[in-house]
């Protein structure tokens, strides 16, 4: 059984900052890529940022220069530092991980989401 647990969401004013954290736990052999996605009401879930095991990152154009993703492989954790937040960043943020539970068992897992609300 694998769990992804997110924390760090909340309410912040425009221009403020938040840091999201996510840790994977359970029967894990190896975690590959990890990332953050978000879904605003009435919209599809979209990629925010993603990071490979060796630290290669990619970002949605809308967050480049404002958000920074990082990870701690020893803790199977991923973080999202969000600066200069805008009301358009308001969404439910989901942690995602591609991982092996055994050398040949590969699957994608999702957290339950943490709400980020940015007031204008």
Image (cartoon, grey):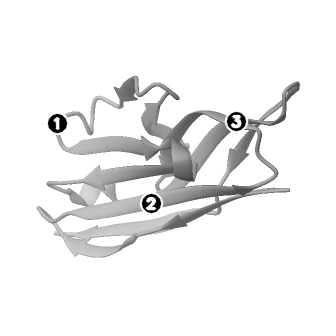
Instruction: Give how far apart the Cα atoms at labels 2 and 1 are.
Output: 19 Å
Residue 48: % across, % down: 41, 40
Tag 2 or tag 3, which sits nearer the N-term? 2
Residue placed most toward the observer, 120 or 21: 21
Q: Residue 65 carries which label?
A: 1
Q: Which element is circle 3 on?
A: strand
Tag 1 or tag 3, which sits nearer the N-term? 3
Residues at badges 3 and 1 in contact (C-beta under 8 Å)?
no
- Furthest-bottom residue in view? 11
106 versus 34 height, above or below: above
Residue placed most toward the observer, 47 or 20: 20
Residue 95: % across, % down: 55, 51
Q: Residue at x 18, y 54 (%)?
A: 83
Q: Residue at x 57, y 58 (%)?
A: 23
Q: Which mark is residue 21?
A: 2
42 versus 53 height, above or below: below
Residue placed most toward the observer, 84 or 100: 100
> In what quadrant of the picture does the C terminus appear?
bottom left
Residue 89 visible to an observer of this rendering: yes
Q: Which element is circle 2 on?
A: strand
> In what quadrant of the picture does the N terminus appear?
bottom right
């Amino acid at each position: 059984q694998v769990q992804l647990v997110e924390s760090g969401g909340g309410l912040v004013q425009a221009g403020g900052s938040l840091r999201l954290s996510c840790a994977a736990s359970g029967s894990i052999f190896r975690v590959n890529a990890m990332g953050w996605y978000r879904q605003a009401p009435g919209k599809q879930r979209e990629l925010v940022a993603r990071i490979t095991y060796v630290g290669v990152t990619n970002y949605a154009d809308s967050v480049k220069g404002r958000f920074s993703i990082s990870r701690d492989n020893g803790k199977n954790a991923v973080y999202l530092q969000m600066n200069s937040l805008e009301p358009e960043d308001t969404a439910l943020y989901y942690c995602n991980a591609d991982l092996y539970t055994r050398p040949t068992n590969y699957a994608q897992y999702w957290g339950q989401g943490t709400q980020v609300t940015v007031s204008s």
